[in-house]
Amino acid sequence: MNDTKTKIISAAIKAFSKDPNASMEEIAESINLSRRTLHRYFKGKSELIEEIIDYASNLCLQKTKESIESSTDPKIQLYTMFLCDIKSGYQFRFLYHYRDNYKGMENESSDFKEMMQTFRDLLKKLKTIGLFNSQLTMDWIESLYFSTIDAAINLILEDESRTQEITEMAWISYFNAVSHSKKIKTN
């Protein structure tokens, strides 16, 4: 992929993450291109969005695989994945929010589907070895993961000088919420 096309995709991811209705003109202006130049690369918004899905899904899949390969310890794999997802910021947000439900992305991108399967396999492994609270369902553990990362990204976008602090608080919050503990009576 050439540099201009990559610049357009990155600018569009950022723009759509902030405003899903961002125009092609706003995207072009954000990187000092004319709308005409942008249209040489993408005929319209739907073509651009399809390219973004492929680009962001592939990037996130690569990061997921790297996280799994980073260690043989599943907890460290999850921690590494968590950090990568926060660091990927706009790409993560685009995939998480696009279509109002990230689960719909699995039907649109084989890379996204593979990434989610790898992620879910890791969560199942962690639950099987007893690291997660047995009262929590896999759906809850997964949803909490994505919600925590999204909250962290939102806070980082407000104040990037607190990135490290916010990332640490996000991990502590997520891991403490899902880790094994004594059963809590709710009645």
Image (cartoon, rainbow, N blue to C red):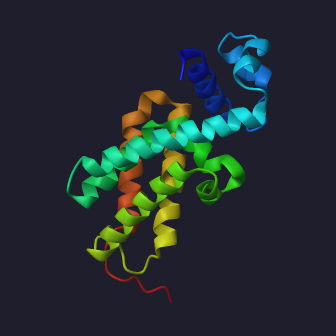
Q: Nearer the viewer, residue 118 or 94?
A: 118
Residue 57, image x, y percentages: 53, 44
Residue 167, image x, y percentages: 39, 42
The image quarter containing residue 48 is top right
Q: Is residue 19 visible?
A: no
Vertical comparison of 11 with 162: above or below: above
Q: Is residue 97 left or right of residue 183?
A: right
Residue 90, image x, y percentages: 56, 36
Q: How many marks?
A: 0
The image quarter containing residue 174 is bottom left
Q: Nearer the viewer, residue 157 or 85?
A: 85
Residue located 33% across and 55% down the image: 78
Residue 109, image x, y percentages: 58, 50
Residue located 44% across and 76% down the image: 136
Q: Residue furthest bottom?
A: 187
The image quarter containing residue 56 is top right
Vertical comparison of 28 with 126: above or below: above
Q: Is residue 75 left or right of residue 33?
A: left
Vertical comparison of 143 with 14: above or below: below
Q: Is residue 146 left or right of residue 65?
A: right
Residue located 36% across and 36% down the image: 164
Residue located 58% across and 40% down the image: 54
Vertical comparison of 101 with 151: above or below: below
Q: Is residue 180 visible?
A: yes
